[in-house]
Every structure is written in structure tokens, then in C-alpha cells.
Amino acid sequence: MGEAIAFYTLAAFILGFAVLVITTKDTVHSVLFLVLDFLFVAALYVMLNAPFLAAIQVLVYAGGIVVLYLFVVMLVNLKRLPEAFQDPNRHGRIGLILSVAVLLELAAIAALGVGSVAPVRTAARALPVTGNTEQVGWMLYTSYLIPFEIASMLLLVAMIGAIVLAKREL
Amino acid sequence: MISAYIPIAIFVVVATGFAIFTLVFTSLIHPEKYNKVKLEPYECGIEPATDARDRYSIRYYLIAMLFVIFDVETVFMFPWAVIFDQLLLFGLIEMMVFIFILVVGYYYAWQKGALEWV
Amino acid sequence: MTPLLVAQIGLTLFVFLMLLQSAAVMVYFERKLAAFLQQRVGPTLVGPRGVLQPLADIIKLMFKEELRPGAADPLLFALAPIISATAAFAAFAVVPFGADTTFFGLLDQPMRLQVADVNVAILVIFAISSMSVYGIVLAGWSSNSKYSLLGGLRSSAQMISYELSYGLSLAAVLLIGNSLSLTEIVGAQSGTWFGFIPRWFVFLQPIGFVVYMIAGVAETNRAPFDFPEAEQELVAGYHTEYSSMTFAMFFMAEYINMVTVSAVATDLFLGGWHGPFLPESLGWIWFLVKVAALLFFYVWMRWTLPRYRYDQLMRFGWKILLPVAVLNLLVTAAGVLYFGL
């Protein structure tokens, strides 16, 4: 009961801030609402007994990626609205199609994915380590070793991409 | 387990409440005599000619971008370090491979001057 | 209301008040020490030997007019000092500062001297310290003043650059401590080697400790890395436009951050509340002594070393400190593998 109340309160905050992110006119305010949104998502992770994920959510999303957003927003500093947004209906149709597609995707995941949750839980119980962080580490560095190494390739590509984008004459 | 995190939330609420209370309370007791000059930003006594929010160096963006990438790398270190006593040599080798791939990118950034500020 | 719950609430309030007054104590301590290092006398007039000077400062600031530039963003301008203060307080919530105690038998079961006893304390500290960049960058942006904007940008770039080395030096301690809980890491540092060298992690992690302290000084924006408020170039950096109590909030946040960095360093590297002569129940005295020593080091450094140049700072952070921190981590892992801890 208490858990349900906590969940719906957090979910209401998350959705509320998400709406504020896209409706606020001032881009810096909008980025700040995004930070708040991420913090509440982190609280949700804590409630789901995943403190490691919660810390990562704050560290990487709220503390890293949003700082990057803030730098970009402050750098381009939109004093007037871009022209594409003068006609509010211009992107309406594409937006509608995209949102329906995402909705269908989520429905498909919800419908087909329910059965596959249980085996993961039993696998987690069989791990030789206790504690959320330790279990995440164990899964990552034994079963998911290849994705972990591929992640470093992704980071390498991202790093080179960022440097190429930012520096014209090198 | 979740209950261990509630004191952090309480602490955050108390700290925020204290800050807001102090600021509101002092705003009630201090004088308020505004004139036009007080509304100007400080610029050593010269009237500001342009808006402060001008474009600034792209390097700040580059630093933030590199930070996000290395931050993710750092995050991978934490669960690895905690269970290192069970992974042992296998863990050391896989982390060496992971870091080696990133060092390639780090070397590229160094050579391209992305880590220089001038 | 069990006695344990009452004790927990009391402890929370106590820690909050101690942090609050630690800022005042640090103001006096810093001014006196700076005066000593420069062969002056420092504050002497308010109270005996000037001990009431911080109180006088606060009362003066409370009655000062609060100015805000006309073109500032009112919401963000008001929010920035609040974010700074909150982030500074919140990080201390997971720092343990003494052994489990029953308060001289008042409680039937021992309680931990820590506001929030979480098992991922190190991650929480790292995450909250990554939040404190917002107070500074928003203060700089919302003021709509050139000095503030430059100070805020410089400082945020500096903080995120040094955060990486900070995190990596924490990870090296996790390797030898085998836990994310600060209490367990302190527990692993009890006892001695060969009967006289204390089992502090600073002896296993000398490079890690140096990296941690350098990154910690840069994270708290203190000299020789005090670029956000490099007075000669940027007036007062991100808080140029702040006055009255909003200015005091930033000031207080800086001192509380220093206390937190020192307290975490004590727990991770200097054996926390373990020390000779005193029984375990009075270990918090050792903890305070160690924190005070680190804070002395902080102030000493500020009044001895000149400020770096900004490009030197960024080069040092990215080209020296970061590779050293990564190498330290790998060497530590190899050492753990070879010697087996």
C-alpha cells in the first residue's frame, strides 16, 4: 500500500516535470526541469531497490549530460524563437505518427515482455555476490562481457565525434 | 533497505527549508531602496554596452562532452572495483582492454589539441 | 516513537547544526590563520580575541540590502544559492563520524553515528557532489553580468574536469576496501601493521590520497584553484552580483563542502575514528582531530600558494591528474591480485 502511494506520487512528479520541460518557453528553465525529472527518476530507482542505478542516474544524467545541455543552451542562447516554430502545425503530423509508433512499441513490450521478467530475478538470486552494486558488477563483468567491451568502442566513437564536431581547424 | 534513504531526503528538505527561510526572513528585515543604478550589473563603474549573455568559447562544450564520456567510464569502474576480489586476473584483463580502447581516444584527443586550453 | 527513532532525529538535527556552525568556526579559523601567516593579528575587536567576528559578519549581512540586476532571471537568481547550500548539506548525510554507540547505555541497541546509513555511501557522495555544479553555473548565468557568466562557466568546466580524477581515486579505495559503505571501509582500517603503523589506507594508497586531495580542493573551488572567484580577473566570479544573505549562502556552502571533503578523506584514507589512546566510544574525537588537520591544510595552502593560470589548471587536470588516477587504479588492482588482500 505504502509502496503504491510512493510510486504514484513519484510517477506524478516525473510526468509533471516532463510536461514542464516541453512547455516552458525559457530553455534554461526547461533544462532545469529536466534535472528535477531525472532526480525523481533516481528516487524511483531507489524505491525499486536499485540504489546503484539511482546513483548512476544522478551522476551521469543529472550531473553530466544535463550540464552538457546547459552549456549548449547557454552557448546558442536563443533570444527569439527559431522560424520553424512559427507555424505550430508544421510538425504535427510527423509528431503524431512518431508518438503512435512509440506507443505501439511500448504496448508490444508490455504485452510480450511480462513473462520474461521472472527468469532474470531467479538468475540474480543465484549470483555469488550480495548487494545491488555487486550483482550489477557480476552480471556486467561475466555474462555481459562483450557488450561491456563494445560500450568502450561506443565511447571511443563518441569522443572522436565530439572532437571532430567541435574543432574545425586542428 | 529503502528506509535508509529517507534520512537523506529529510536532510535535503531541512537544508532547503533552512535556506529558503533565511532568505525570506532577511528579505523582511533589510532595507529596500531601489534606484536605477542599482539595477545595473557590476562592470567597474562603466555602463554596460552589451548583454552579458553573449556567445562564448566552444571549448566549454568540448570539455563537457569529454567529461560525459569519461564519466561513463568512471561509472564502470565502481562495480568492477567492488567485486574485484572475485574477478581477479580475468577482471584485470577485461578492464585493461576496456581502458586500452579508451586510451586510443584519449591519445587522439591529446594529439588534436582538445585537451589544450589556449 | 521508539528511543532509537528519537535518537536518530536528534542526531540529524545535531549534524545539521554542527555543519551550520562549522562554517562560522571556519571563517574565524581562516581569518586568524591567514593573519598569523602574514604576521598580522586578525580580528580582535568583537568578543575575546575576536571569536564573535563571524556572528557580527552574519548580523551585518542580514541587514544589508539585497541587489539584483534588472536584467537578471529572478527565479534562477533566487534559486542558485539555495541549490548550493542544499547540495553542500546533503553530501554530509552519508558520512559516518564515529563508532556505533548506545549513548552511555541510553539505547538498548547501538546506533551508527551517521545520518543515513546507506550501503552505497561513496556513490551517493559522488552523485551529490556532481549536483553542486548547478548552483554555480546558474548563479553565473542568471546574474546577466559578464564577470558572473565567465566565473560560472570557468568554475563548472573546472569542477567537471576534476570530478573524473575524484571518482577514480574513490574507486581505488573501493578496490582495497571491497565495499561501497563508508562504515565498512573505516572498519577495514582498524588495527596496526607490525604493531605500530596504523592500517590506514593512506599507506596503501599514497598516490590515491594525493589525487583525492587535489581533486577535492579543485571541486570546492579553493586556492590554488579558486578560479570562479579569481578576484584580480573576475571581481568575485559567479557571485559578483550577490549581496546580503544570498552571498552568505554561497560562502557557507564553500566551507561546508570543505568540511565534507575533509571528512570523507578521513573516512577513506586516514582510518576514520580509529586511533591510539582513546577507547572506541570516544573515537569521534580522533575523527574531529583528523578533519581539523585537513582543514588546516586547506587554509594553509590557500595563503601560501599563488593561483594557477586557467590553461595550466585544465592541462594539469586532463593531462596529468586523470592519467595518474587511471594508472593508480590499475596498479592497485594488480597489487591486490599479486599480494591478495
Image (spheres, coloured by chain):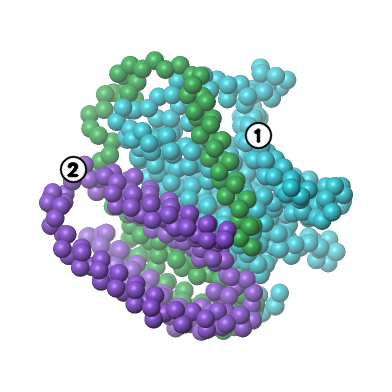
Please name the residue shown 12% across and 57% down the image.
Answer: A90
- Let me know if residue C286 appears in the view: no
Colour chain A is painted in: purple
Amino acid type indicated by mark 1: Gln
Residue B12 image point, x, y percent: 56, 46
Residue C197 image point, x, y percent: 79, 61
The residue beneath circle 2 is: A80
Would you call the spot at circle 2 few (<14 residues within 10 Å), some (14-19), or many (20 or more)? Answer: few
Amino acid type indicated by mark 2: Arg
Element carrying mark 2: loop
Please name the residue shown 83% across and 67% down the image.
Answer: C194
Quadrant showing the C terminus of chain C: bottom right
Would you call the spot at circle 1 few (<14 residues within 10 Å), some (14-19), or many (20 or more)? Answer: some
The residue beneath circle 1 is: C21
Colour chain C is painted in: cyan
Report which quarter residue C333 is drawn in: bottom right
